[in-house]
Amino acid sequence: MKSVAVIGTGIMGAGIAAGFIAQNIPVAILGRSKDKADACLDKAITLAKKIGIHADNAAKEDSEIKNQQFAGVLEDWQDWNQCLWVIETVAENLELKQKVFQYLDEVVPGEIPIGSNSSGFPISKIAEGLNTANRMMGAHYFMPAEVVPLVEIVLGQKTDIKYAEQACALYKAIDKKPVMVKKDIPGFLANRIQHALMREALSLVQEGIATPADIDDAVRYSFGFRYAAVGPMTQKEISGWDGMANAAKEIYPSLSNITALPPKVVQLMAEGKTGMKAGEGFRKWTPEEIKTVSDSYSRRLKAAFDVLNIE
């Protein structure tokens, strides 16, 4: 059976691999050490079972499933011609990603598409100067990768669209939701929309108009609630563009157009208050609260995933 090569042994690598394992597509997890690759594969199998594994593997022991996969050092993998898809998930370091892609350019047969899960670096820069840049593209997941359905397929300056369409077809086959981004722009698609929202939300907090908690409630229980059912474009098709257009005349001129973080956020960063991982952001977090909110977040994501699959 054709396999998928996942390069990188971190959290994203495990989540990405889990999505394929759950759909009975073998993976080769490739990293800098055999131990790290094995640990990543163990995590991927656990995650695959958590999200719902293919019926062919449901009754198998973890060891049996593991025997269907490969975990090892990148340079030890030789079966590139057996790959459907190769995706890089190494640390967000441009030089490192470029080195990985230079290696892949040489060893992976030219007809096999290659993606990068980079969230910040343009694929055009990662694949710059490579002979087979035409089959290289961005393949941006969102955490947790095994749960969130979206995968952004981003075309670089030299990407041949036929390879992007091939990647999209593969993701549709494993019940992901690929979207094609036809220009290699900063933030791709989802993060641009997300940052536009965050700019306005943080500006409202900075100006004392609303608290962070009120911002959360305003999003979750109004348009965020509706967006779990349909996206913003379809929602306005339902409600009517004329109403949106009339409101826009009043609202657009007053929206934030800042090009740097608001002072309150800059101060938080300077004080080391980076959120739950530091025990404090806009508010303090106890270990018990962190566990409660994190567990609730995971359950809600799974519930939202189930809702999205209702036709």
Image (cartoon, rainbow, N blue to C red):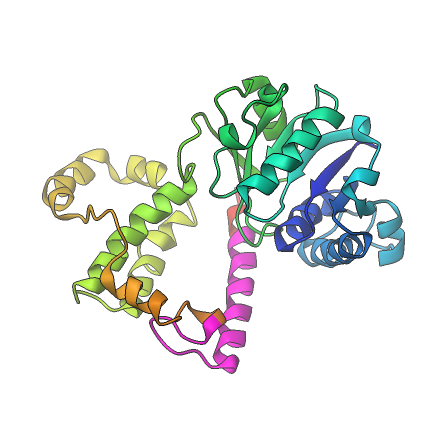
| Quadrant (top left, top right, bottom left, bottom right) of the N terminus | top right
- Decide whether residue 67 is among the magenta residues: no
Position of residue 135 measured from the top left corner of the image (x, y, whole percent) = 61, 22
Q: Is residue 262 left or right of residue 11?
A: left
Query: Which of the 4 quarters of the picture holds residue 11?
Result: bottom right
User: Which residue is more in the foreground, 27 or 239?
Assistant: 27
Query: Which of the 4 quarters of the picture holds residue 141?
Result: top right
Query: Which of the 4 quarters of the picture holds residue 99?
Result: top right
Q: Is residue 227 left or right of residue 157?
A: left
Position of residue 244 measured from the top left corner of the image (x, y, whole percent) = 20, 40
Q: Residues in magenta?
A: 278-306
User: Which residue is more in the foreground, 280 or 242?
Assistant: 280
Position of residue 284 measured from the top left corner of the image (x, y, whole percent) = 39, 78
- Decide whether residue 297 is among the magenta residues: yes
State the residue at coordinates (24%, 46%).
Answer: 259
State the residue at coordinates (70%, 49%).
Answer: 18
Q: Is residue 154 visible?
A: no
Q: Is residue 217 above or below residue 183?
A: below
Position of residue 292 measured from the top left corner of the image (x, y, whole percent) = 52, 75
